Image (spheres, grey):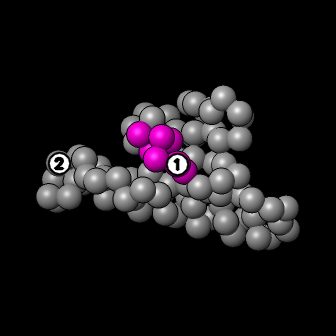
Amino acid sequence: MVARNTRGDSVYLKPEGCAFALRVSNHARTPKQRKNHPDAITSLVLRDPTSETALAEAVAVALRNFSGERVKRERGADGGVAGGRDPGL
């Protein structure tokens, strides 16, 4: 965990040596959160209680999205330079 908001309802997780974060929260990101954490390339939003199976599926989707977005950004929009635009995830 690399950051937590003041209310404690959002945490930002980064794999070791990675420039990008996965955000876990109970609500969608606000423009302020996007500005303060442009490195958060994927969010896992958990609003309601859910079954263990549904949670495992949501985590798997978030990890797959994080991995794909990380590869895209590390390659860069021009195919070789890291960077790219934040799609507002």
Please report contact status of discs 2 and 1: CB closer than 8 Å, yes or no. no
Q: Tag count in the figure?
A: 2
Pointer 1 local density, CA inside 10 Å: few below 14, some 14–19, many at least 20: few
What residue is shown at x 83% (from left), y 66% (from top)?
50
Q: Residue at x 65, y 41 (%)?
A: 10
How far, Cα to Cα, is label 2 from label 1?
Answer: 28 Å
Q: Which mark is residue 30?
A: 1
Name the side, left or right, on which 39 lies relative to 82: right
Q: What stretch is highlighted in magenta?
A: 29-35
Give above or below for 81 relative to 44.
above
Closest to the observer, 10 or 30? 30
Q: Position of residue 42 (x, y in %)?
A: 50, 55
Q: Residues within 10 Å of mark 2 (few under 14, many from 20)?
A: few
Q: Which amino acid does label 1 sit on?
A: Thr
Residue nearer the viewer, 26 or 65: 26
From where the camera sits, is residue 18 visible? no
Is 20 situated above or below 76?
above
At 71% from the left edge and 34% from the top edge, which residue is drawn?
Answer: 8
Give coordinates of residue 88: x percent, y percent. Answer: 42, 56
Location of residue 67 (image quadrant) = bottom left
Q: Name the residue under label 2.
A: 81
Q: Quadrant of residue 35?
A: top left
